[in-house]
């Protein structure tokens, strides 16, 4: 049983009990999330309710991504940040929803970038010099990835491939070794991964990081923004769970 | 047809630190002042209010408080043989915009220069001989001394409520401060902030290395404070949102918190936000400015006549305005003549990351922008450049401005960028790693300069500023030395692993990677009008009622963050305008 299977209230009260009981030095010396796991190992019973913030992809209808793109987004998110014992995966955290919403912001439309031509080829240290805005990089990249997959794997799109094949393709794209039609695989991959991480770690109000799962995983207190009493503490882990921008406690 | 406004005594372009300082000083002197700011008006309330202002996606991805590059940016190339391409997305440096400018989103590191930074060229020549300086290295002395500046550096610290510990007061060394600093007339207005683990470790490592560590002087208030203008600051609560963010607590010094509350109440001061200055207007002699032309919030062209024109925009844009307005002669690297665009320099920033086990509570999410620990044992006259074979000093410091996960989580070398292993690494290291930064001086060179781009234009039809810059062997060598020293110190602290990013031989300037917003030079102050754009009062040699106040005046960059010196220079220039220029308008130094 991992953290994500616990309702947040139970997790919270457990955390308080733990700290109160002072399972320290062991529990207090490690981040709260690990303290819960330590407690589980120590035989503290866990509540059996499903993860309160678990995201149901069917409950969200994408308005930016088309159906075929949506399938790619979910498959790629699941490979890039998979669900495992360390913490929630990108899909259950709502990262696909984040991506769909984030692609419709002025940011993704390139509104804060200089987008005037001419668009010249330049070495990598001069950064992206193309004319596609972020949302177009993702859209063109997904389409090119799927086209590549269909050619190489008997008509199967990326989402229909085995996990290991998907991982291999993403690894090739990361290194720029995958030749895609019309776009650099590396450019697409880099932008996609950055957006996935943004969605995973940004405030839940943007659609990802459901129930602050990513923050709990790393022990980030979120938007508490007041640590005057903890700057010089050296002998214990910061004890409080995260708070998000709406004031909700994780 | 431009709408012509009634003439004012002074028009200020840009409402960051230097604009606010000049506006305060000149309205004090009774002048009518209009300030034109290209960005929006901003104040602590409501723009930096908790919790909205500390949204990481907006602050560090959408870059809410930084300049949008859609309207104006620069183009960049490595050498004059290359074709420059636009700086399309924020990477290497982060200019601000809006009222407060970069003074809103800085961290608060507030250093003074060393005395030897001010007579830089002659000091190097004296110590190592004229031949030690390569022919293409165009470093100069500042035309003023540390002693000239001391009262003005002091004033800026008072206004900012700078927290620190003096190292030398009236020539007497003080315990716990920087023993190598220039003599101060008094201590900082506030004592140092509390120390993070990383700073505590820095002191320990520095001791091992035989270095004299001291708290970084920082304009993040360590206690309640009222500045000489009556503006109140509250103690920093270590919220962890400094760089890229406006301060939610009235703790980080900014023009918004420390000067504008007074200015906004003055009848002889008018702030016009959303006003994009297009050019400085000159009369037929080209020796006198008549005012500026700008676009108002509705995009209408407006002419603002003024007796004095004060360029207080970010360094790059001050130079740009001088070039597009025809003030002075553009620099030509081939003949090595002309002054506008000459001596562009940057900063040499590198990083060392230390990773620890889970019993080490580094808590990088806690942050006090500028606070931490540093040392000057490898800076200024402490460093034996003759032996090392490069010009310029540097610092290693432990600083913790606050790290949230959207801003990136450091992981040990060899960690993949995604997948389960990456997840495990970010979970393991987020609270148990910290970094030291290695910040070095950056020399100016004949081949590194600013000019107008022949191809790319801004949203107003003006040519973009073109930056020709690359790392030179001197800075690469310096980077390798300083990072090596930081790694040596880091290893005395027994981390599980350590990362260092010294520049490699032949490495080119990479505009995609954030390094430092400390871009400098391009319209420098000097004692010779053939090699400098401004005289010792930051007054244009060519157009005597134009002053260009900012890091554009640095003939090269020293090892420190520039803001303390920029503020000091602003008070120095303002004092000269009040006490000399206004009595007898015209050139204050004869060319």
Image: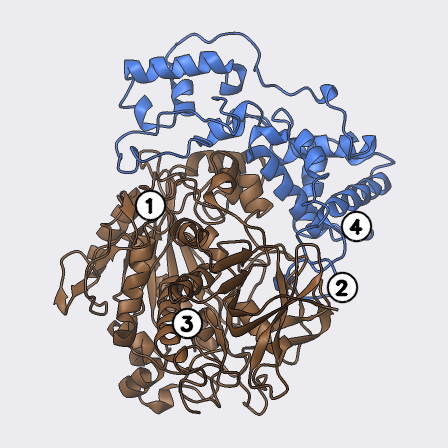
Residue A250 sits above or below residue B310 on the image: above
Whether callout 1 and callout 2 share a subunit is answered no
Whether callout 4 and callout 3 share a subunit is answered no
Query: Badge 3 is on which residue?
Result: B557
Query: Badge 4 is on which residue?
Result: A180
Crowd class of label 2 (few under 14; some 14 to 19; many from 20; radius 10 Å): few
Secondary structure found at label 2: loop
Q: Real-space Cα distance between discs 4 and 3?
A: 44 Å
Q: Is residue A47 visible?
A: yes
Q: Nearer the viewer, mark 4 or mark 2?
A: 2
Label disc, if present, on residue B289 of the rendered structure: none
Q: Label 1 lies in what chain?
A: B
Secondary structure found at label 4: loop
Residue A183 image offset from top left, x and y in percent: 78, 52
| Number of numbered discs visible in the structure rendering | 4
Q: Is residue B507 visible?
A: no
Query: Badge 1 is on which residue?
Result: B232
Query: Badge 2 is on which residue?
Result: A119
Residue A243 image offset from top left, x and y in percent: 47, 26
Q: Label 2 lies in what chain?
A: A
Q: Real-space Cα distance between discs 1 and 3?
A: 32 Å
Residue B95 occupies quadrant: bottom right
Residue B558 image offset from top left, x and y in percent: 37, 71
Q: Which mark sits nearer the N-terminus, 1 or 3?
A: 1
Q: Colour of chain B?
A: brown
Secondary structure found at label 3: loop
């Amino acid at each position: 049983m991992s953290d994500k299977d616990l309702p947040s209230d139970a997790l919270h009260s457990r955390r308080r009990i733990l700290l109160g009981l002072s399972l320290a030095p062991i529990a207090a010396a490690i981040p709260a999330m690990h303290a819960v796991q330590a407690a589980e190992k120590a035989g503290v019973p866990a509540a059996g309710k499903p993860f309160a913030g678990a995201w149901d992809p069917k409950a969200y209808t994408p308005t930016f991504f088309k159906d075929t793109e949506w399938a790619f987004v979910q498959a790629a998110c699941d490979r890039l940040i998979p669900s495992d014992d360390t913490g929630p995966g990108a899909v259950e955290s709502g990262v696909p929803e984040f991506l769909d919403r984030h692609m419709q912001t002025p940011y993704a439309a390139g509104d804060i970038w200089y987008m005037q031509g001419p668009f010249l080829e330049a070495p990598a240290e001069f950064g992206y010099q193309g004319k596609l805005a972020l949302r177009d990089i993702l859209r063109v990249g997904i389409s090119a990835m799927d086209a590549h997959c269909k050619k190489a794997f008997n008509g199967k799109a990326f989402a229909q491939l085995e996990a290991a094949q998907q991982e291999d393709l993403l690894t090739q794209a990361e290194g720029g070794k995958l030749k895609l039609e019309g776009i650099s695989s590396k450019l697409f991959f880099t932008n996609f991964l950055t957006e996935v991480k943004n969605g995973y770690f940004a405030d839940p109000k943007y659609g990802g990081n459901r129930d602050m799962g990513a923050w709990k995983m790393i022990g980030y207190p979120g938007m508490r923004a007041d640590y005057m009493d903890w700057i010089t503490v050296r002998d214990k882990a910061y004890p409080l769970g995260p708070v998000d921008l709406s004031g909700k406690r994780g | 047809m431009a709408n012509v406004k009634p003439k004012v005594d002074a028009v200020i372009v840009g409402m960051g630190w230097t604009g606010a300082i000049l506006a305060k000083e000149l309205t004090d002197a009774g002048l009518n002042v209009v300030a034109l700011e290209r960005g929006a008006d901003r104040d602590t309330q409501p723009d930096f209010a908790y919790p909205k202002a500390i949204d990481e996606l907006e602050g560090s991805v959408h870059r809410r408080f930084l300049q949008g590059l859609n309207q104006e940016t620069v183009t960049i190339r490595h050498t004059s043989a290359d074709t420059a391409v636009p700086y399309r997305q924020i990477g290497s440096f982060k200019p601000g915009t809006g009222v407060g400018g970069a003074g809103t989103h800085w961290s608060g590191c507030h250093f003074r220069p060393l005395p030897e930074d001010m007579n830089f060229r002659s000091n190097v020549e004296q110590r190592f001989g004229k031949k030690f300086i390569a022919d293409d290295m165009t470093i100069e002395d500042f035309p003023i001394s540390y002693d000239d500046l001391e009262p003005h550096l002091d004033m800026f610290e008072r206004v900012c409520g700078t927290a620190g510990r003096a190292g030398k007061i009236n020539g007497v060394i003080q315990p716990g401060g920087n023993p190598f600093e220039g003599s101060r007339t008094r201590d900082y207005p506030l004592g140092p902030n509390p120390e993070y683990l990383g700073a505590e470790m820095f002191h320990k490592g520095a001791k091992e290395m035989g270095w004299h560590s001291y708290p970084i002087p920082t304009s993040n208030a360590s206690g309640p404070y009222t500045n000489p203008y009556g503006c109140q600051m509250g103690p920093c609560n270590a919220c962890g949102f400094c760089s890229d963010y406006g301060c939610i607590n009235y703790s980080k010094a900014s023009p918004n918190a420390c000067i504008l509350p007074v200015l906004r109440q003055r009848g002889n001061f008018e702030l016009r936000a959303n006003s994009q200055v297009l050019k400085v207007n000159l009369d037929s002699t080209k020796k006198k400015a008549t005012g500026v032309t700008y676009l108002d919030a509705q995009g209408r062209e407006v002419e603002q006549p003024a007796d004095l024109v004060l360029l207080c925009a970010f360094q790059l844009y001050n130079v740009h305005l001088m070039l597009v307005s025809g003030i002075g002669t553009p620099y030509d690297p081939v003949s090595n003549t002309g002054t506008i665009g000459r001596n562009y320099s940057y900063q040499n920033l590198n990083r060392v990351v230390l990773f620890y086990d889970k019993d080490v509570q580094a808590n990088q999410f806690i942050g006090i922008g500028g606070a931490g620990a540093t040392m000057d044992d490898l800076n200024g006259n402490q460093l034996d450049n003759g032996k090392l074979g490069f010009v310029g000093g540097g610092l290693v410091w432990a600083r913790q401005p606050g790290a949230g996960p959207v801003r990136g989580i450091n992981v040990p070398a060899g960690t993949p960028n995604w997948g389960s292993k990456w997840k495990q690494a970010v979970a393991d290291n987020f609270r148990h790693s910290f970094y030291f930064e290695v910040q070095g001086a950056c020399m100016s060179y004949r081949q590194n300069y600013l000019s107008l781009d022949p191809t790319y234009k801004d949203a107003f039809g003006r040519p973009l500023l073109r930056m020709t810059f690359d790392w030179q062997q001197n800075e690469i060598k310096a980077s390798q030395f300083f990072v090596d020293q930081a790694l040596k110190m880091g290893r005395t602290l027994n981390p599980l692993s350590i990362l260092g990013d010294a520049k490699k031989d032949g490495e080119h300037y990479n505009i995609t990677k954030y390094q430092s917003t400390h871009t400098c030079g391009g319209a420098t102050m000097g004692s010779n009008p053939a090699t400098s754009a401004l005289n010792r009062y930051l007054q244009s040699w060519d157009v005597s009622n134009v002053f260009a106040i900012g890091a554009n005046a640095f003939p090269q960059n020293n090892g420190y963050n520039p803001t303390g010196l920029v503020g000091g220079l602003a008070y120095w220039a303002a004092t000269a305008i009040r006490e000399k220029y206004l009595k007898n308008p015209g050139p204050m130094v004869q060319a």
